[in-house]
Amino acid sequence: MREALAHALTGPVNLDERDGWERPVDRIHALAAAQAVTLNRTARECALASLGVSLIALKAANRPDEYTRTVEKLMDALMWLRPRPSSKQANVIARQAIMENVVDHCFTCQGRGHVQGDNGVVKACSACGGSGKRRYSDDERREALQMDGKEFDRANRQLGEALKFLSMAEAEAIKTAKKMLEKW
């Protein structure tokens, strides 16, 4: 579904009318409506859906113009945490979380999950454990967040929460868009 929504955001929009066919313009409308639909949803669910739409546009549709909006929406979500990060910390944490979410493929196997060994045998990638996903180390995070000690420990926990928010946001946006497409 994520790919279909991304294609609708980036591809040519065909406005041909065919009953019973889901068109890219329908997906665009469903995605836009996912941000606005408030019926039977909490304010957080609405905020997460809106964040998810921006994240899908940034990551799957390759829309760099959504980066600033995604950072701002994630910073707002970080203010739900206790203790709250400062505005400056929230900005740094949000940027790192988005970077980790968008640049998530393993550089060793290029996201395939396997590599060819010296003798030509295909084996699971040792860097990612065969998942194809990049694992960011604490040292990489410490350098990106530019924090040490207890401040880093707290920011690292908040970064974990930010990554959960991004995952939940993407799921909420897709779930809402699916509901909207089912209604039509």
Image: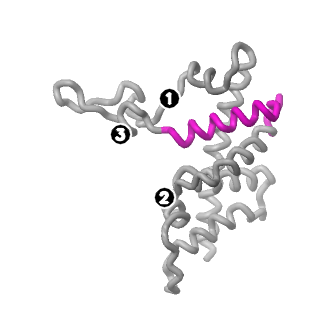
Rendered position, 36 above or below 52: below
In the image, 19 versus 136, the foreground residue is: 136
Q: CA distance from mark 1 to mark 3?
A: 14 Å
Name the residue beneath numbered marker 1.
135
- Looking at the image, the residue that sits furthest to the front is 65
- Looking at the image, the residue that sits furthest to the top is 149
Question: Mark 3 is on which residue type?
Answer: Arg
Q: Residues within 10 Å of mark 3 (few under 14, many from 20)?
A: some
**Residue 113 placed where, x, y %?**
36, 36
- Looking at the image, the residue that sits furthest to the left is 119
| Residue at disc 3, secondary structure | loop
Magenta stretch, overall SS: helix
Q: Are marks 1 and 3 in contact (CB under 8 Å)?
A: no
- Pointer 2 or 3: first along the chain: 2
- Pointer 1 or 3: first along the chain: 3
Q: Are marks 1 and 2 in contact (CB under 8 Å)?
A: no
Residue 1 visible somewhere in the drawing: yes
Rendered position, 145 above or below 181: above
Question: Mark 1 is on which residue type?
Answer: Arg
Residue at 56 percent across and 23 percent down: it is 140
**Residue 18 placed where, x, y %?**
49, 85
Name the residue beneath numbered marker 2.
3
